[in-house]
Amino acid sequence: MAKYKKLTLPLILILGIVLVAIFGKAISAKSATNDNRTEVVFWHEMGGPSEQALEKVVDGFNKSQIKYKVVPKYQGSYDEAIQKILQTHNTSTSPAVFQAFDISTAQMLHSGYTTPVQDFIDEDHYDVSKISSVARAFYANDGKQQAMPFNTSQPVLYYNASLLKKYGITPPPVSPSYSDITRVAKELYEKSGHKTKGMTVQVYGWFMEQALANANRQIANNNDGHTGNPTKVNIDNPDTVEFLKWIKENIKADDFIDYGSGASAGANQTAGFLSDKVGIFIQSSASIGQLSKNNKNELGITYFPHPDGKKANGVAIGGAALWISNDKPKNVQRGAFEFIKYTLKPEVQAEWQKATGYLALNKDSQKTSTLKDLYAKNPASKVPGEQLANAKANFANSGILMEGMQLARQLEEVAMETVYNGGDINSALKTADRSINENLTQLNKANGYK
Amino acid sequence: MLKTSTTDVVSEKKAATTQRHGFRLNAKDNYYASIFLGPSLLVLGLFVFYPMLKTLYISLFLTNTLGKTTVYVGLSNYAKLISSPDFISSMGVTLFYVAAVTVLTVGLGLLLANLASQKLPGIGIFRTLYSVTMGVSVSVAAIFWLFIFNPSTGFFALLSNALNLPVVNWLTNPTSAMWAVIITTVWMNLGFTFLILLGAIQSVPNTLYEAADVEGASPRFQFFNITIPMISPTLFFVSTITIIGSFKSFGLIDLITKGGPTNATNMLVYRIYKDAFYSGNYAKSSAEAIILTIIIAFFTLLQFKFLEKKVNY
């Protein structure tokens, strides 16, 4: 008897664990079978008003479906989501369809964790010609569509049209040059009696990359990675210098206000713009929704500025695409593609643009009454779409297909901050180049790329 | 009588020890030891020791896009870090931050606790006020201070405007951004430090002060020669906690500056996080994590070796 007594405690423990395992499983299984439809887990990074708009899209899809049910899950910022997606692959928590942002394209492509949407496009004979070709090209490789663009934005220049009118300042032209903006910024600062700062450019690597795209300047070799894996990056070039010189000139004239970097800087900048503390700033077209709401002033929008004496080359698209994970059964992947097709319907894209400012990707969206009403009410909201339509896609403005872009962007931002705080432009850019290239060499070595 | 009983106990113990062959565990002890220690060893092993060893392992390799170890590079990750001006500046920034936060938190905490320990009518209100930040979460504190630091609509900006002073852009200037983070952290920490120190001061026996009063010692003399020595274990505890806590500071930095501007507030912990979960460079961040572990271990040891001797228990 004493022999068995020893075993009581471990037995109780084991029994407890077994019970938890059985019932835990039963409980979770029960919740999954509440609905007979196949669950398609969808990871996204849309916060604030965009999240609400996205939930509406998902709801619309779920109502239209008897076979599939999309379950949206918010995953924080774009940056953080990438590692979550890569590290959960092949586990039960991983998503069936996920949203990954522009600069992670090379990473996702090389991971081998995704099923190219081209497979489903071919299977369904789905007509992609209605979808913006510039946006599609960004997420295609070797003529195969890897992911489907979903939320596509363009960086544009916002200005306070009411303030300019009040002080009798001529607004910037449709496609302004750096000096056009400097003129308006200086006039606004002077005529407002130094109450309103003329302009700001948030410390954000994306804006620097777009300034280079607009100047038709490639940053990485092998045509920004479009014809081969990049091995060298060159931020320290005349076009970057000109962009930073433009900012520096305005800092010296005191009509520039620096809000720093990061999400809080974006929020501070928006607050500053809405409270007449700053007149001009660059931001994604996806901010139109937020900037039109609660704005007592008239919102002015023009194209992203270009260097003086050069023609604007057009900026690359920003935003994110939807990818299908290949670690889920075929029918779940099918459900994911059905959802992607739904998101690209003309009416869905039109509603999406109206709610968020991301551009409607389906050409037929322009014919919907939703967008026609929007343009009639607020003509400026047409500008980002026109900027996109006017750009002719080439290597410089089709994004940089390179791994390690997230770190590169951080280093670009350090360079910008250095200059904003009075540092030398050339040495700041040289430092950035050195660190980016060091990281790139190491990454290529670790990945076994030539 | 008393003496005999003590000897009895000792001899009994001795007998027990000899029976057990000098504290060696017998089979029964082993069994119970494994029952009681097993679960915690399992948990610690799985969630502390295994990740630690794995971190050490990863730090000797390069990791690819998927975060998998590919090329063995030995100590080259460490060598690169130690020779990188970026990383060195990060270390300097961290040490400065830790020192400033610890000195200010403990200093101000001590000052407030000393003030609030006076027996005055209505002192309870101040005790509550001083400790109120204990109930504030990091995110609330960060948002609250971000409003204050906003260069257009923030409290400091409006104050400077009203007084016709130049507006300090707190979060974009490297020096002031560091102070912004320090101020916020100290403000956050103060409530807890204050409460602990107040408890310690109040538990100093009143008779000591009465005796000192009889001797005619000044309040200043009493503070340095009675209060401080008597609460030294608590001071030691509070400063150790603050040092370790500020080395690990993350939430406020993530929410207020994100390590910027120009890496001025890019502390080690934040750098580790960014390198791993933003850039996906697990090898580099593992090496950084190991270095941070060594630094914290070094400071903790130093503290126990030198400071602890001066503590009155």
Image (cartoon, coloured by chain):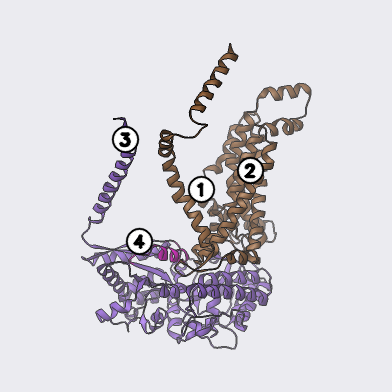
Are the residues under marks 2 and 1 on the same chain?
yes
- Letter of the chain shown purple in the rendering: A
- The circle drawn on residue B137 is 1
Identified at 73% across, 22% down, the residue is: B211
Q: Chain of mark 1?
A: B
In whole angstroms, how far apart are the C-alphas of marks 2 and 1? 21 Å
Q: Are labels 4 and 1 assigned to the same chain?
A: no
Q: Which mark is residue A101?
A: none
Q: In the image, residue A274 lies at what x, y percent?
A: 52, 65
Chain letter of mark 2 equals B
In-image side of B226 versus B193 (left or right): right
Q: Position of residue B155 (x, y in %)?
A: 60, 54
Where does label 3 land, which residue?
Answer: A8
Relative vertical location of residue B127 with respect to residue A370 in this rendering, above or below: above
Which residue corresponds to mark 2?
Answer: B239
| Residue on which disc 4 sits | A91
Residue A400 or residue A72, whichever sits in front? A400
User: Earlier along the polypeptide chain: callout 2 or callout 1?
Assistant: 1
Say what secondary structure mark 4 lies in. Answer: loop
Q: Nearer the viewer, mark 3 or mark 2?
A: 3
Query: Chain B in the picture: what colour?
Result: brown
Quadrant for the C terminus of chain B in the image? top right
